């Protein structure tokens, strides 16, 4: 599928009502629907990308920067500046994109890459094409059974993720584990390169990991290694602790030394890649081979 058709397909899944135009063609304020449509598109393109992502991501980041700058609710100048810098660069990552859209994520009700924004009401009004305010209703979060009134975001980013976003992130992680389970089972009782291991509340790499950060860690790793899979350590006896979300390469080896050689060949340091035996019967002792 060519890039234009892919972009059109992704956009069709994120738009409920309205048609998106070119951000650069309008100068007036934009409403929440226009902002979040582009935000959802960027999240979809981020997950579809590999390596340092592709041109579509940078073009959408540029469009979203313009929309964030013109958002009628204000407070998204930080996102606009960060996205503009990304659009002008030649590489980015899922973590950088997520950090650059923290304010927009508050407005849209979900982190970058976590599904799409939901909207209540039908309404009628302007979209990005003409820069109008529109008269759409605000969303009822999909992770809550109660209707939550919409409030404008503060100019400062939150110190912790809202509870509903964390609930969504936790559910997304579990869904990924369920999706990858069949592939992980083919690796049972074999040595694999372990690329990441994070638990809720873990302090590492200069940050405290909540569920959103753990999901970002996984998706960022998968951009470099598209075949990487996610497992829950509690499902396997070879892990000492049963509360870690573990990312492994879906390439198995007959020995830990061979798995570590793969890490070396990929130029990954010893803290971010080492040999691990994934097993339902082998205990933790002897199931890890540090480098």
Image (cartoon, rainbow, N blue to C red):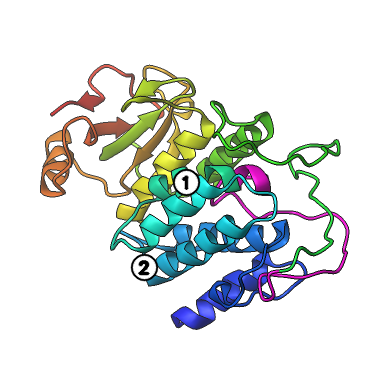
Of the 4 image quadrants, the one containing the C terminus is top left
Characterize the local packing of mark 2: few (<14), some (14-19) or many (20 or more) Cα atoms within 10 angstroms.
some
| Pointers 1 and 2 in contact (C-beta within 8 Å) | no
Can you give x and y, in whole percent of width and height, for residue 211 in the image? 53, 32
- Residue sitting nearer the eye, 7 or 227: 7
Q: Residue 126 in magenta?
A: yes
Residue 208 in view: yes
Magenta region, main secondary structure: loop
In this picture, residue 30 sits left or right of residue 246: right
Determine the image quadrant of residue 231.
Answer: top left
For mark 2, give the secondary structure: loop
Residue 54: image tag: 2
Characterize the local packing of mark 1: few (<14), some (14-19) or many (20 or more) Cα atoms within 10 angstroms.
many
User: Which contiguous range is marked in magenta?
Assistant: 105-131
Q: Residue 124 in magenta?
A: yes
Answer above or below: position of 202 versus 65.
Answer: above
Answer above or below: position of 254 versus 163.
Answer: below
- Which residue bears the numbered disc 1? 98
Residue at position x 49%, y 23% in the image: 200
Residue at position x 68%, y 34% in the image: 164
Can you give x and y, in whole percent of width and height, for residue 87 in the image? 39, 62
Can you give x and y, in whole percent of width and height, for residue 6 in the image? 51, 76
């Amino acid at each position: 599928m060519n890039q234009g058709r892919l972009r059109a397909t992704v956009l069709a899944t994120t738009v409920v009502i309205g048609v998106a135009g070119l951000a650069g063609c309008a100068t007036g304020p934009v409403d929440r629907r226009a902002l979040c449509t582009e935000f959802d598109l960027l999240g979809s393109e981020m997950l579809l990308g590999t390596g340092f992502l592709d041109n579509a991501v940078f073009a959408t980041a540029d469009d979203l920067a313009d929309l964030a700058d013109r958002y009628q609710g204000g407070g998204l100048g930080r996102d606009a500046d960060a996205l503009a810098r990304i659009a002008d660069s030649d590489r980015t990552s899922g973590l950088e994109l997520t950090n650059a859209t923290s304010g927009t994520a508050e407005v849209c009700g979900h982190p970058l890459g976590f599904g799409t924004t939901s909207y209540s009401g039908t309404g009628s009004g302007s979209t990005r094409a003409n820069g109008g305010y529109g008269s759409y209703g605000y969303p009822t979060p999909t992770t809550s059974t109660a209707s939550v009134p919409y409030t404008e975001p503060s100019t400062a980013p939150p110190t912790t993720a809202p509870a509903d976003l964390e609930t969504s992130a936790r559910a997304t992680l579990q869904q990924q584990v369920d999706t990858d389970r069949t592939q992980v089972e083919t690796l049972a009782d074999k040595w694999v390169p372990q690329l990441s291991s994070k638990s809720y509340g873990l302090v590492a790499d200069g940050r405290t990991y909540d569920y959103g950060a753990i999901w970002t860690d996984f998706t960022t790793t998968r951009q470099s290694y598209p075949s990487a899979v996610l497992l829950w350590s509690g499902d396997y006896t070879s892990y000492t602790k049963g509360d870690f979300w573990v990312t492994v390469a879906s390439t198995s080896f007959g020995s830990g030394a061979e798995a570590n050689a793969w890490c070396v060949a990929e130029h990954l340091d010893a803290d971010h890649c080492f040999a691990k035996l994934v097993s339902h019967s082998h205990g933790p002792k002897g199931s890890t081979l540090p480098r």
